[in-house]
Image (tube, helix red, strand yellow):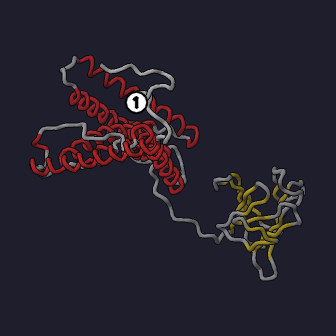
Amino acid sequence: MSRPVFIELLTPDGEVLHRHKHNQLPIRIGRAYDNDIILDDPHTAAHHAQIELNQLDELIISDLDSFNGITRANSRERFFVVDGDAVYRLGHTRLRIRTPDYQVAAEQTDFTNHRWEGLLPATVGLLLLLTTGLLTTWLSDLNQGSLGKYLLELVSVFGFALGWSGIWAIFSKLFSGHARFGRHLFIVSLCLTGLEVWDYLSSMLAYAFSWEVLAHFTVHPLIFICAIALYFHLRTAGNKKPGRLKFYLLALALAGTGISMTKQYQASNHLGDALYLSQLYPPALRISRDVSLAELMSNIDELQATVDADRKESSEKNESNTPAGSVDSADTSSPGTDTPDQP
């Protein structure tokens, strides 16, 4: 055979561990030392599989009467016609077979070799943290606190961001060979800024437009913002499965919102974490229409009717649950006890 055949041994995630080039067929695979490719997998036979040409001049991989056989996409067959995109499993070993005429994918954009690395994103991230920390402290400072209060706020925010980014940088160095501390610092800075901005923006919109849902469910958008930040952290750390990663993080965020609503319902019989608009702003921010006194009184009357109906239903239910033979001790006296005469 003039064309070479490339056999790639893969990890469970599809990464290439070893690539073997062979110019002669057949190619035998197994644990025995007389094979062309020797496997260190106890779940494979001494002579497990063979790559050869069939009568139609097709390249096939065939089973050599092994116990575990050969599977492709959870389908076990005696032999398979070789497909360059298919992964064949021999025991716990995954391999792929390709020939020189296999068409590789197009070149991908290199996002790790641009100016948006190192000092530039780190500086932008620190400026975002500085601006957000000072602004939020100033907005919440009703007593005109001292300079030390502002410095303490900045130190706590910077300490968290630098520590968080350092952990992710170590993680990235271990798995991708590049720390990329600046990119991680920029991501966590955007996340913290987004959390603060959403906190103020949601309360202002809820007050301006009477959108109570923004006040009732304040935690859930924050969970999704954190999930987005985790996605970019993991992508920067070298994750190569963005589709699967998005699915996992979306499921994690939905689980977090479900747990939050469950806890709130158990505590207050309401799914939201707030029952009313707790943030008040100047009346000039109000955009929704004003409610007239007549409409307000009408709503109060409807609310009173609803409360009275619920109270009546609750009292009737309590009476129906009281046993028929039970008598209140305050209304009757014990047998054999004389009741004193009334004056």
Residue drawn at 19 percent across, 48 percent down:
301
Number of on-image labels:
1
318 with respect to 167 (left or right): left
Residue drawn at 30 percent across, 48 percent down:
309
Residue situated in front as seen by the camera: 312 or 150: 312
Q: Quadrant of the C terminus?
A: top left
Label 1 neighbour load within 10 Å: few <14, some 14-19, many 20+? few
Q: Quadrant of the N terminus?
A: bottom right
Residue situated in front as seen by the camera: 74 or 184: 74
242 with respect to 19 (left or right): left
Residue 134 image position (x, y, % from top left): 25, 29
Residue 81 image position (x, y, % from top left): 74, 74
103 with respect to 327 (left or right): right
Residue 117 image position (x, y, % from top left): 41, 42
Query: For numbered disc 1, what is the local secondary structure?
Result: loop
212 with respect to 246 (left or right): left
Let me know if residue 295 appears in the view. yes
Let me know if residue 115 appears in the view. no
Residue 146 image position (x, y, % from top left): 22, 17
Residue drawn at 79 percent across, 57 percent down:
91
Residue situated in front as seen by the camera: 268 or 341: 341
Residue situated in front as seen by the camera: 268 or 229: 268
**Residue position marked by numbered label 1 in the rendering:** 331
Q: Looking at numbered disc 1 in the image, what kind of residue is underneath it?
A: Asp
Residue extending furthest toward the bottom: 56
